[in-house]
Image (cartoon, rainbow, N blue to C red):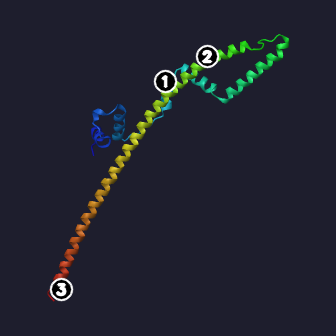
Amino acid sequence: MNKTIDDLANRWLKRQPDGLSQLENRVLQSTLERTTISRDTNKAVAFHQTFGDRLADTIARIGGSWSFILTFIAFLILWTAGNVWLLSRDAFDPYPFIFLNLVLSMIAALQAPVIMMAQNRQTERDRIDAAHDYEVNLKAEIEIMALHEKLDELRHGQILGMRDEIVRLADLVRQIDERLSQQQSPS
């Protein structure tokens, strides 16, 4: 059973081979070679990450956590309570806490673009995962169609075998009937 990518493209994808994408060609090739197509996309993405990418992901992961939010709320409470208490004795940042507002603005100005960078990379990872999922699903569909084809061939072979057996048995019954007829007619 020598199959080619052209045969598989026509049979299972109902398309001409020159109309296939690179991904579909790779899936059909792996089907012919009977190799797996799944892979760990996280390893591939992690391999190409720069130090800045990893740093941005870490900052986004920490900045979007409950521990960061609760720690920051505690810091704000300490800052305001400390300055209100110190207000009577030469406070560092007296009410309305202008320096605290400046620090918060700078943190927000730096944190927002870093989180956006991490989100953009996550979007790219999601695209890679979606393409890989499509590839694996297409391979699974092709393998299922191939199994159905094999089962249909087996069933067809069995039906032909049963038909031949029925013809043989019918012939045998006819021969037995002829013998019985011959034995009964001379008497």
* Residue 91 spot, x, y in % from top left: 80, 12
> Dot 2 lies on which element?
helix
User: Which quadrant is home to the C terminus?
Assistant: bottom left
* Residue 119 spot, x, y in % from top left: 54, 25
* Residue 1 spot, x, y in % from top left: 27, 46
Does 72 sit above or below residue 93? below
Q: Nearer the viewer, residue 1 or 138?
A: 138
Q: Nearer the viewer, residue 62 or 173?
A: 62
**Identity of the residue drawn at 61% across and 19% down:** 111
Q: Locate residue 86: give its quadrant.
A: top right
> Dot 3 lies on which element?
helix
Q: CA distance from mark 3 to mark 2?
A: 110 Å
- Amino acid marked by disc 3: Gln
Give left or right: position of 167 versus 116.
left
**Identity of the residue drawn at 57% across and 19% down:** 113
Does 154 sit above or below residue 43? below
* Residue 98 spot, x, y in % from top left: 72, 12
For label 3, the residue is: 184
Q: CA distance from mark 2 to mark 1?
A: 27 Å
Q: Nearer the viewer, residue 178 or 58?
A: 58
For label 2, the residue is: 109
Crowd class of label 3 (few under 14; some 14 to 19; many from 20; radius 10 Å): few
Q: CA distance from mark 3 to mark 1?
A: 92 Å
Observer able to see residue 37 = no
Task: Mark 2 or mark 1: name the one nearer the start of the chain.
Answer: 1
- Amino acid marked by disc 2: Ala
Seen as rendered, the residue at the extreme front is: 96
Closer mark to the observer between disc 2 and disc 1: 2
